Structure formats: structure tokens, C-alpha cells
Amino acid sequence: MDSSMDTTAQRELPKYRSHKQVWALKIKEVVSNGGISDGAIIPENNEFGPIPVSGEYLKKHQPKAGGYYVVYPDGYKSWSPAEAFESGYSKA
């Protein structure tokens, strides 16, 4: 390990609080056709139908049931584990 990293590792990094607004749904099921083909996110909330996602999205984010499908204001779509999402966001 580089000795310049030792002093940084011994101090706590500055803390930041998220104040972003996102759109999200908890995932009940992830449907994938395997490989790079398209699939869908099935939300736990029955008021919403399946959300089509690309094979690229599935490969990059590897969403899992119980986590959250997240859409940011700039349109970027992601996935977050439930614990991380629920500890950082509350319903607006």
C-alpha cells in the first residue's frame, strides 16, 4: 500500500446527505429472457404494470426482487438494494 494512503485511511471522510428526488418502485420480480435480450421489472405495487427494460439494463444493473427500480430526473434508470434505498430515501 502507498504510504500516502495511510494517513487518509486513518481519517474519516467528509459525510454527505442525499437530497435528490427520484422515482422508484419496489421490485416483485425480474423477468429476463437471458443473455442480452429484453426483459421486464414487475413492481410490487399492483397499480403499475410490468416495466420493460433492455437486456443491457439487466446485464449492467443485475436487478433483484426486493430491491428498487430507480429513475433519476435526467432519465437515467438504475437499481438499488432495498436496504441502501430505504436508508437514503423516504416517500415524498
Image: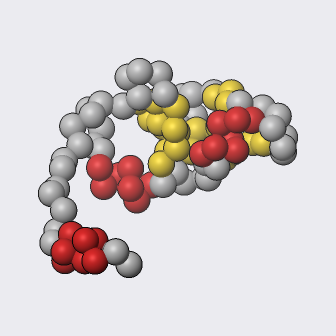
Residue at 28%, 77% (x, y): give it. 3
**For the N terminus, which image quadrant?**
bottom left
In the image, is residue 50 above or below residue 2? above
Please give the name of the residue rendered at 48% of the width and 48% of the height, measured from the top-left corner.
Answer: 80
Residue extending farthest to the front is 3
- Report the front residue among 9 and 30: 9
Where does residue 91 sit, x and y in percent of width and height? 30, 38
Residue 81 lies, in percent from the top left, at 48, 54
On the image, the x and y values in percent for residue 77 come to 52, 31
Q: How is the image coloured?
A: secondary structure
- Tell me where residue 7 sits by quadrant: bottom left
How many dots with numbers? 0
Quick one: which residue is furthest to the top in this view? 74
User: In the rendered view, does 70 fall on the left or right side of 20?
Assistant: right
The residue located at (67%, 30%) in the rendering is 53
Residue 18 x/y as whole percent: 23, 43
Q: Nearer the viewer, residue 36 or 53?
A: 36
Residue 65, above or below 76: below
Quadrant of the image for the C terminus? Answer: top left
Give the residue drawn at x 19%, y 47%: 17
Residue 28 visible in rendering: no
| 1 vs 22: above or below | below
Along the line of sight, the residue nearer the viewer: 28 or 18: 18
* Quadrant in which residue 44 is drawn: top right
Can you see residue 91? yes
